[in-house]
Image: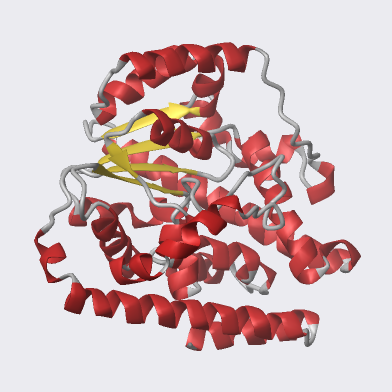
Amino acid sequence: MFRSVAVLFLLLETFGFKIKYVVIIFFRWLVAVLIKLTLALDFLFYPSKRKKKIISPVFLIGHPRSGTTFTHRFIMKNCPQFNSLCLFDFLFPALTAKRMMRSFKPKMEKTKLDKLYDPKIHKTGFFMPETEDVALFLRYFDGLLSWMYFYTWKVFKTQDEFEIALNKRLGQKKFISYLKRAHHRSIYLSNKTMFSKSFALIFNYQHIVKEFPDAKILLVIRDPLFAIPSFMSLVSGVQRKLNNLDILSDELKKRFYNNFYKTSLYYYQKLHQIVSEKKENKNLLVITHKEISSDFQNTFNKVIDFYNIDRTPELEEAIALQVEKQASFKTEHEYSLEKFWLTETAIKQDFDFIYKHYNV
C-alpha cells in the first residue's frame, strides 16, 4: 500500500490531481488483494501442489524491443514441452482463482486489448504469452513497468541516487520467489518445463541462479540505436493516455526521456557485466537481434540445442516458414531519434562498450 501512495503523490506532484490516478491505484490495490487472498486459499484447497518441483527452468531476458517477445511467442507456439505465463495467469495466478474464472475464459479470449499498446508495436491479449514484468507490476506495483510509467518522472539529484532507486525498484529478491509460485501453479498438472520471459530480470540474475542452480538463461542483445527509441516510442503511447504527454512542457518531457535513456544505459551496462563475468557458463547463451533477423535458421538452432528443445517435424516446418516470412518482413513501427532528444553520435559514444564486444 505504501508504494501505491508514494506513486500517487509523485503523480500528483508532477501533474496535479486527476481522478484516473486514484482509479489506477484503487484497481491495483484490488488486484493485489485478490491475488494474495486466492494464493492463500490454494494452501487449503490444493495442498498437494507443494509436492511439485520445478526442474531445469529456462529464462529469456533482454532489453525491451530486442526481439525477446518474438522469440518467446515463437517458442511457445511451436515447442509444446514448455509452459509460459500469459496475462490471464498474471491476474489469476492462484489455482483457486483460475477455477473461479473458468466460465469467463471464452469471453476473455475474444476480448481485444489494443487500447493498452499500439498493436503495430506490440500485440497483446489475455491468453498470449507475455513478459512477466506485468505480473510483478500487478502483484507489487513495482518493477520495470512501475519504474518506466511513474518513477521516470522523478527528479534525481545525482547518478548514485538514480542507480540506487533503479536497483531498489527492479532488483528485489521477492520477485523471483513470487514468479516461482506463479509458475509452480501453472505447471501443477503437467510435466512441462517452466519458461520465464522478462525484461528486468537481468537485475535479478544472482537471485535466479541461487533459486534455480540448473536454470538455463538466454540473453538477447539489440543495437541500442534501435532498441532505445523503439522502447521510448512504445511507452510514449501509454504516457499519452496516462499523462497527456504531447501537451506537457519540454522540461517535463526532457526529464522523462533523459531518465528513460539513463535506465537503458544502466541496463546495458548490467547486461554486459553479467556476460563478461559468466561467459564460460554453459547455462548462459547470448544471441543478438541481428542474428535473429538475418540468420534465423542457424540462430534458432543454437536456441534449440541450448534449451534442449524437441526437434519435431512441426518445429522444422515452422522454422522454414519463419525464414520465408523474414525475407520480406517490414516493420510498421516508425520512430525518430530527434523526437526523444537523442542523437546517433551520443548513443554510439555512450554505448561504445556494446559496439566493441557484440556484433549488434
Q: Is residue 161 left or right of residue 314?
A: right
In the picture, residue 89 is in which quadrant?
bottom left
Residue 208: percent from the left, percent from the top? 27, 53
Q: Position of residue 305 (x, y in %)?
A: 26, 22
Residue 110 at what x, y percent from top left?
A: 60, 51
Residue 290 found in image quarter: top right
- Toward the viewer: 35 or 204? 35
Residue 130 visible: yes
Q: Residue at x 45, y 54 (%)?
A: 200
User: Residue at image x 64%, y 71%?
Assistant: 150
Relative to 253, say whether 269 is above or below: above
Whether residue 159 is visible to the viewer of this picture, yes or no, is no
Q: Is residue 136 above or below residue 271?
A: below
Question: Height in image: 276 above or below 103?
Answer: above
Image point (56%, 45%), residue name: 64
Coordinates of residue 338 in the picture (x, y in percent): 84, 43
Identified at 75% across, 32% down, the residue is 332
Q: Is residue 83 left or right of residue 49?
A: right
